[in-house]
Image (cartoon, helix red, strand yellow):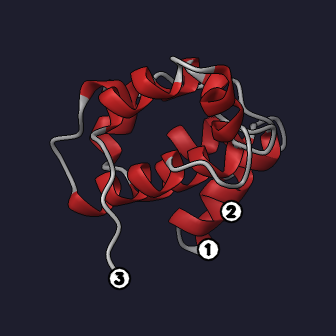
């Protein structure tokens, strides 16, 4: 059985119309992660709203950082650097994204004073 969803911009606007629907997005039943995952699998060009996701934290559960890990792992590097509004995620998010995106041997480039965010973006 195949699921079909609204495009991301329409989904975000319709989910914000009702408090019950907004509460749904903050639970494990949210349709947003599936839509984002499919957008990343389809590849560029990504819709402009995808770059603004970090500022739309209202639509994500408390553990919504997993959505951004998926985004950092699967999106094109040029798009991440030029378009994505980089959020202020915890170091654990950046570390997990780095470990899942890059080769393990690349950890050697992380200096003592470097954050995982810095090494990921480098």
Q: Quadrant of the N terminus?
A: bottom left
Mark 2 crowd level (few <14, some 14–19, many ≥20, 10 Å Cα): few
Place of residue 17 in the rendered image (x, y in percent of width and height, measured from the top left): 51, 17
Q: Quadrant of residue 96?
A: bottom right
Q: Which mark is residue 105?
A: 1
Q: Which residue is mark 3?
A: 1
The reply to whether residue 65 is visible in this rendering is yes
Q: Which mark is residue 94?
A: none
Q: Is residue 103 above or below residue 89?
A: below
Asked whether the beta carbons under mark 1 and mark 2 sit within 8 Å of each other, the answer is: yes
Place of residue 45 in the rendered image (x, y in percent of width and height, measured from the top left): 15, 41
Q: Quadrant of residue 113?
A: top right
In this rendering, position of residue 55 left or right of residue 96:
left
Between the residue at mark 1 and the residue at mark 3, the CA separation in whole angstroms equals 41 Å
Q: Which one is in front in this view, the residue at disc 2 or the one at disc 3?
A: 3
Q: Residue at x 30, y 59 (%)?
A: 4
For marks 1 and 3, the one nearer the N-term is 3
In this rendering, position of residue 61 left or right of residue 32:
right
Q: Residue at x 64, y 24 (%)?
A: 57
Q: Residue at x 63, y 74 (%)?
A: 104
Q: Which residue is mark 2?
A: 108
């Amino acid at each position: 059985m195949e699921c079909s969803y609204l495009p991301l911009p329409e989904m975000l606007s319709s989910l914000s119309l009702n408090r019950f629907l907004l509460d749904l997005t903050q639970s494990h039943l949210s349709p947003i992660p599936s839509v984002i995952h499919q957008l990343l699998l389809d590849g560029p060009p990504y819709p402009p709203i995808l770059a603004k996701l970090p500022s739309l934290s209202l639509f994500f559960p408390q553990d919504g950082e997993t959505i951004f890990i998926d985004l950092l792992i699967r999106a094109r590097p040029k798009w991440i650097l030029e378009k994505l509004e980089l959020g202020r995620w915890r170091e654990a998010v950046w570390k997990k994204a780095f470990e899942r995106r890059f080769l393990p041997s690349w950890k050697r480039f992380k200096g003592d004073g470097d954050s995982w965010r810095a090494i990921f973006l480098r």
